[in-house]
Amino acid sequence: MTEATQSVVVPDIGDADGVEVIELCLQPGDAVAVDDAVLVIESDKASMEIQSTVAGVLANFTVALGDVVNTDQVVAEITVASAAAVESAAVESAAVESAAVESAAVETAPSTPPGAAETPAGSAAELEVRLPDIGEAGEVVVIELGAAEGDTVSAQQMLVVVESDKASMDIVAPADGVLLRLAVGEGDSVGEDALLAVMSTTGAASAGKPAAAKTETAATAQAPVAPQQAAAAVAANQEPEVRAAPTPERHASGLAPPPTQAAAPAKNTVIYAGPAVRRMARELGVDLGQVTGTGARGRVVKDDVSLFVKTSLANGGANGGAVAAGSGIPQIPEIDFARYGEVSLVPMSRILRRGATNLHRSWLNVVHVTQHDEADITELEDFRRGLKAEGERRGNKITPLAFIAKACAFMLTQHPKFNCSLDSKVENLVMKSYINIGFAVDTPDGLLVPVVRDADKKGVWELAAEINELAAKARNKKLTPTDLQGGSFSISSLGSLGGTGFTPIVNAPEVAILGVAKLATKPQWNGTEFVPRKMLPLSLSYDHRAINGAEAGRFVTELSAVLADMRRVML
Ligand code: CAO
């Protein structure tokens, strides 16, 4: 059987200058089925999965997370089993593409979808909410209801979510008012112009002036977006699929809510997820409103749903959304800070949110202890400074971190337990015969930990070059998933910033992390007198379930000795 490569390209994204790659759904080497999501692109306001039109194996991505891509750009390559398959896929792909172009053409034409229509007869205050023009999609399925009959709803609040094979969309309330009737239920298939709901406007209900309220609503109502418009929406930066969750009730006193309320899971105020994720959540019975999204702009990705389910199972199925709710840990009360002065909300970046989830998970799972020491690196610093000119010739900057990485890699060969992981039942140590060292990089968007593979097999120049390259990639948003995976030990260096020590959080499932603070010249007793020495503060946090205190003490003491005299690496 012959092998051939099929390119995955960006479909027509209309007039947009480019859209961002926010998720790589697979890894090179993964098996791909037809219609599998390969990656996700997103503008400020909408997102879209790019799916494979062939079955095969993902050969490589030609773009990275954070890249901006355009129509027809090749984003990945898939190895398929035979040339015939490629040919037929090409035909199929061309057909899909022309359909997309057609659809985009329809969508960009001015449309007047009957999203909100006044009820012709009967109460003049009533508004019908109907499914807008869905083009050739035929029918879409109602996958979620955002409000119940009798609920007071505000303009732009999500009433119904519908989904086609490729995209999901929110149908929002066209005006403030009361939801009088839902004409559909979850699972219903609906076509263009189907009646979804009937609502009354607030003006009619409260002010008793239906005619005026209707006119105002008609003028301000915003037409919902059709599901197959996802690509065009990505391109045109249309309104986001954003839904306001019901505002959590507050205690009348304005103080922290009573325990029963505190235990209630706080819903996400924004739910942003692709159709595949929504489908997965539906199948598993997961309420997406309770899942912390770690994708771009808080987008919920499949891993988030998996983690939510795992956590829920670990908590005996009692997961109320926040890990804390089912784990017996009291939740921090929700405070209305605006009661005490002006406040504003700054959305956390994807990296920050993901980091928060990972750190919280490590913090809750790992039994942390931190061992502190100081290494006398006076000679090492003299040696390193002496290499500066050579570094400039090589175009390679060498900082203490490269030597610290080298020393740690050596120490891990001597103390392999610090390079292990615990298995999920905490019954075995998973010993690794590779030494991959991650190091924390501070980027404008948050903390990232790229990994230097096989650090024990590399020299200091090579380690320095790789650290510099990975740090630059992290800051330029060019890291690939592979760059971030497979670490077995981490280093967090705040040495260039200052400080005398800190307690780093173990990057679970690793069991140890070395924190490095700023070296300082201090008086040291040499047996006869005090002499100035350059002392480097080290803080080793470790998982006490895997490593005992004496082992950690030995590790740090020996590490200090190695840094004091790197010739020990050769012994
Ligand atoms: N003591 C004194 N000076 C130090 C030092 C230390 N421990 N470590 C580095 N320096 C010096 C370097 O030598 C360099 O000075 P010169 O140019 O004169 O040699 C200067 O500080 C700047 O170093 P750098 O930051 O460019 O390079 P680095 O290799 O030390 O660090 C990186 C690279 C990516 C780790 C770092 O830039 C970074 O992002 N650190 C933050 C990590 C972080 O956020 N950790 C916290 C995570 S837990 O919340």
Image (cartoon, rainbow, N blue to C red):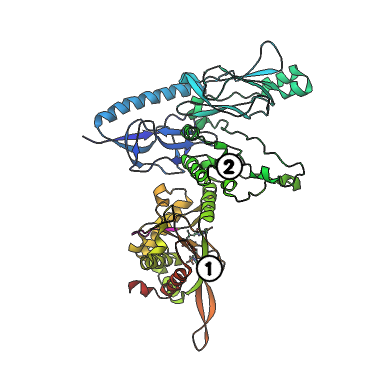
Q: Is any atom of residue 119 visible in this view? A: yes
Query: Does mark 1's beta carbon lie closer than 8 Å to ligand 1?
Result: yes
Q: Place residue 381 in its image quadrant.
A: bottom left
Residue 271 shows up from this direction: no
For the view shown, which residue lies furthest in the left direction? 1
Q: How far across and how far down the image is residue 339, in percent?
A: 75, 45
Task: Please give the range of residues in magenta.
Answer: 431-438
Name the residue beneath numbered marker 2: 320
Residue 92 spot, x, y in % from top left = 34, 25
User: Residue 124 versus residue 311: which sits nearer the camera?
Assistant: 311
The yes-or-no answer for disc 2 within 8 Å of ligand 1 is no
Q: Amino acid at mark 2?
A: Gly
On the image, the x and y values in percent for residue 257 come to 71, 45
Task: Say left or right for 214 vs 265.
Answer: right
Q: Quadrant of the N terminus?
A: top left
* Placement of the C terminus among the 4 image quadrants: bottom left
Whether pointer 1 and pointer 2 mark residues with C-beta atoms closer than 8 Å, the reply is no
- In magenta stretch: residue 437: yes
Residue, disc 1:
518
Residue 471 falls in which quadrant of the image?
bottom left
User: How far from the left and from the top, in percent, is residue 449?
Assistant: 46, 54
Residue toward you, 302 or 410? 302
